[in-house]
């Protein structure tokens, strides 16, 4: 169980953040100089060097988003120009990519971050540059919304790269591109010029994910544990009927792959912030019976986020870094592992620091949302949990301090069942390596915390 420090404040982490931004600058520069985009997308490190893995192109926006965030944190314009140039040169194909569920990763991290900086006055106002970023987000949101599988219960979901039968938990984190597209006034145009609301599909996907991928311990879920998350749900594509839980990267359909939970927690927490700025009439107008009002929608998102947040606290070691799956078989060889800090050097199961980085931001956003809602005690618990996890990650052994190692966050894991992750010589399990989504979410967490510590504008994509 996470040992939440209730006395920790964002400003207490400022020295760690300063150190991190000093380390990250050299790593971003070095990878940008070395990597040839024609060779694919950097995904994870092997012996400290980033390599590609041909599965889906979902991490390139994280690489260039890191450069934009480095400028955000330090004001060093070389990183702004690096991120701008790469976005123009490389990212267009990601905007029109019809084969992935990852638009909110690639395109919000690049076009979305640059649009946010212009909105904040951090970069000079340019009408046509602003319209360029907005157009990319609009099209990205529409392309993502078109990747659609209807379900028998009147909902539907953005299906994963696995195919139209597959609802991934990951996509809830990427759903923000539909939210931004809706905010910008865009719709998806279908056959016979049918206008398809991005907000409706946002709500349908969110409800389908909560209904089928998150367990609440009651009703359909009476046999299961509140807050457990399944990586994937399978549907019959002929009639839209739910068939069974599944997983691609977790241990089993009846255990929790912890990064899948992390996507759920951070996704719903951030989308609660989006709902704050939505007019109640907009939600009522889309006419979704399951979420007929803004109040009901917020309640459902909160129910889901809090269930998984509580589960993670109870099923994670004391320092806030999880093992890769709560049902990983080697954990049986580690009695008491939830009563002490995670051990990335153990002989049985790898930890996943990237899941911790994603969760930390989710806790902070959820805590802030509840605090502003007047639920101070509950909000404080989640805020402090996020800060506790962050303190762990911005220090050794998770912070990558070796200049020769291209990663920022050590001891992440990509795909344990496929044995893709590097096992160092003399070790039995993977460890000591980085991944692009882990680095990006550590960077986003650092910028978010720096703003909290200094009283700068709150880090959000939705204040347009």
Image (tube, helix red, strand yellow):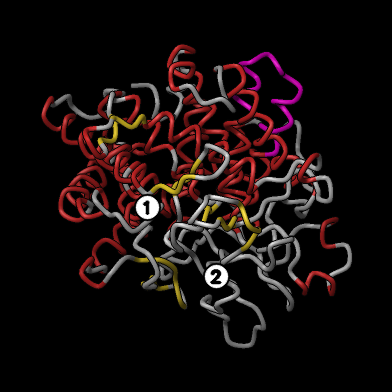
- In the picture, measured across the screen, residue 435 lies left or right of residue 248, that is left
Could you classify mark 2 by the number of other residues whose Cα lies within 10 Å: few (under 14), some (14-19), or many (20 or more)?
A: few
Could you say whether the residue bearing mark 1 is in a helix, strand or loop? helix
Magenta stretch: residue 370 in it? yes
Most common SS among magenta residues: helix
Residue 55 in the image: state x and y as whole percent.
40, 70
- The image shows residue 177, relative to residue 244, as above or below, that is above
The residue where tag 2 is placed is: 415
The residue where tag 1 is placed is: 62
Distance of mark 2 from mark 1, alpha carbons? 18 Å
The label nearer to you, 2 versus 1, is 2
Residue 121 in the image: state x and y as whole percent.
26, 23
Span colored in magenta: 367-385
Residue 147 in the image: state x and y as whole percent.
37, 49
Q: Residue at x 29, y 30 (%)?
A: 195
- The image shows residue 275, relative to residue 234, as above or below, that is above
């Amino acid at each position: 169980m996470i040992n939440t420090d209730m006395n920790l404040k964002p400003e207490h982490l400022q020295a760690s953040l300063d150190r991190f931004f000093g380390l990250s600058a050299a790593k971003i520069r070095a990878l940008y100089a070395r990597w040839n985009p024609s060779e694919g997308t950097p995904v994870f490190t092997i012996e400290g060097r980033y390599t590609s893995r041909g599965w889906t192109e979902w991490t390139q926006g994280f690489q260039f988003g890191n450069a934009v965030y480095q400028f955000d944190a330090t004001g060093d314009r070389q990183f702004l120009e690096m991120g701008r140039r790469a976005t123009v040169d490389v990212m267009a194909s990601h905007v029109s990519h019809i084969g992935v569920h990852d638009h909110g990763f690639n395109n919000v991290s690049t076009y979305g971050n640059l649009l946010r900086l212009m909105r904040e006055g951090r970069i000079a106002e340019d009408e046509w540059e602003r319209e360029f970023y907005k157009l990319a987000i609009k099209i990205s949101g529409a392309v993502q919304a078109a990747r659609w599988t209807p379900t028998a219960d009147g909902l539907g979901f953005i299906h994963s790269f696995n195919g139209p039968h597959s609802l991934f938990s990951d996509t809830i984190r990427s759903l923000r591109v539909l939210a931004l597209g809706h905010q910008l006034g865009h719709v998806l145009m279908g056959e016979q010029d049918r206008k398809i609301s991005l907000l409706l599909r946002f709500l349908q996907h969110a409800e389908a994910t909560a209904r089928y991928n998150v367990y609440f311990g009651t009703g359909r879920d009476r046999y299961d544990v509140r807050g457990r998350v399944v990586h994937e749900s399978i549907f019959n594509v002929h009639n839209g009927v739910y068939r069974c839980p599944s997983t691609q990267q977790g241990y089993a359909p009846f255990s929790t792959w912890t990064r899948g939970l992390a996507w759920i927690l951070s996704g719903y927490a951030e989308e609660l912030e989006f709902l704050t700025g939505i007019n109640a009439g907009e939600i009522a107008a889309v006419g979704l019976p399951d979420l007929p009002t803004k109040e009901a929608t917020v309640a459902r998102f909160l129910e889901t986020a809090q269930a998984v947040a509580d589960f993670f606290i109870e099923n994670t070691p004391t320092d806030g870094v999880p093992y890769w799956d709560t049902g990983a078989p080697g954990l049986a060889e580690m009695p008491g592992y939830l009563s002490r800090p995670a051990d990335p050097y153990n002989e049985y199961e790898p930890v996943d620091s990237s899941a911790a980085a994603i969760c930390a931001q989710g806790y902070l956003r959820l805590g802030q949302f509840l605090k502003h809602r007047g639920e101070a005690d509950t909000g404080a618990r989640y805020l402090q949990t996020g800060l506790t996890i962050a303190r762990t990650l911005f220090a050794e052994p998770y912070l990558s301090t070796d200049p020769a190692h291209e990663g920022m966050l050590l001891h992440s894991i990509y795909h344990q069942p496929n044995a893709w992750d590097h096992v160092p010589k003399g070790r039995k399990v993977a460890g000591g390596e980085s991944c692009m989504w882990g680095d990006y979410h550590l960077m986003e967490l650092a910028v978010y915390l720096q703003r909290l510590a200094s009283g700068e504008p709150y880090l959000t994509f939705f204040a347009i």
